[in-house]
Amino acid sequence: MDEKPDLVVSGINHGQNTSINIIYSGTVSAATEGMLLGIPSIAVSVASHSLKADCSAAAKYANLITKKVLKTGLPEGTLLNVNVPALPQNEIKGIKVTRMSNSIWLDKYERRTDPFGRDYFWFSGDYKTYDDDINTDDAALKAGFVSITPIQFNFTYNNSSFINTLKSYESLGRNSKKKM
């Protein structure tokens, strides 16, 4: 069977996938795979790591957004990253279309011991949000909005001046008889 699904919806994930977190997210990666196959794709997360978090509002918004995407489609090479605040549905202020914020992790690693006496390291740290622009994913979530961020994956640094500088690297190793 060569038929593709009409849509890929990945999630609902526990824990927001905003800013830098999209790089680490399996939820966003699953939607990315769908997008790469030419299938409209959506990643959905609720901004709580608690496994007891109520996902009903996230499910409602996922349903609304899914219906809209099925009706209107998405641009080629674009997926939607949807993050829903961990609030009761009646406290969510609405939807904001956002861009990624400039938040980062200040990494910490805790040494722990497993039941067999072996040491391992557990990632922890502090998530720092440095901008409060309501048009960014983290700020919209913090303000009580559902954040919809269109994502495209092109990690090439888009700076023609620097790319032209790097062109000098092309001559490295040419006509060299030395082994690299």
Image (cartoon, rainbow, N blue to C red):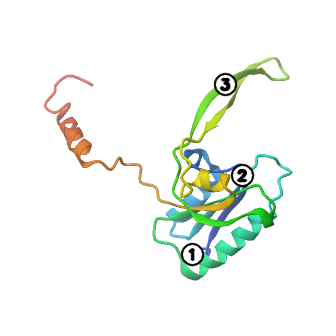
- Image mark for residue 47: 2
Q: Which residue is mark 3?
A: 109
At label 3, the amino acid type is Tyr
Residue 49's x, y, as percent? 76, 46
Looking at the image, residue 61 sits to the left or right of residue 71; the answer is right
Residue drawn at (46%, 55%) of the image: 153
Is 119 located above or below residue 137 in the figure? above
Image quadrant holding the C terminus, namely: top left
Looking at the image, residue 62 sits to the left or right of residue 97; the answer is right
At label 1, the amino acid type is Asp
Residue 144's x, y, as percent? 69, 58
Q: Which numbered disc, 1 or 2, marks the residue that appears first in the sequence? A: 1
Residue drawn at (72%, 52%) of the image: 47
Q: Secondary structure at mark 1?
A: loop
At label 2, the amino acid type is Ala
Looking at the image, residue 50 sits to the left or right of residue 31; the answer is right
Q: Which residue is mark 1?
A: 2
Is 107 located above or below residue 8 in the figure? above
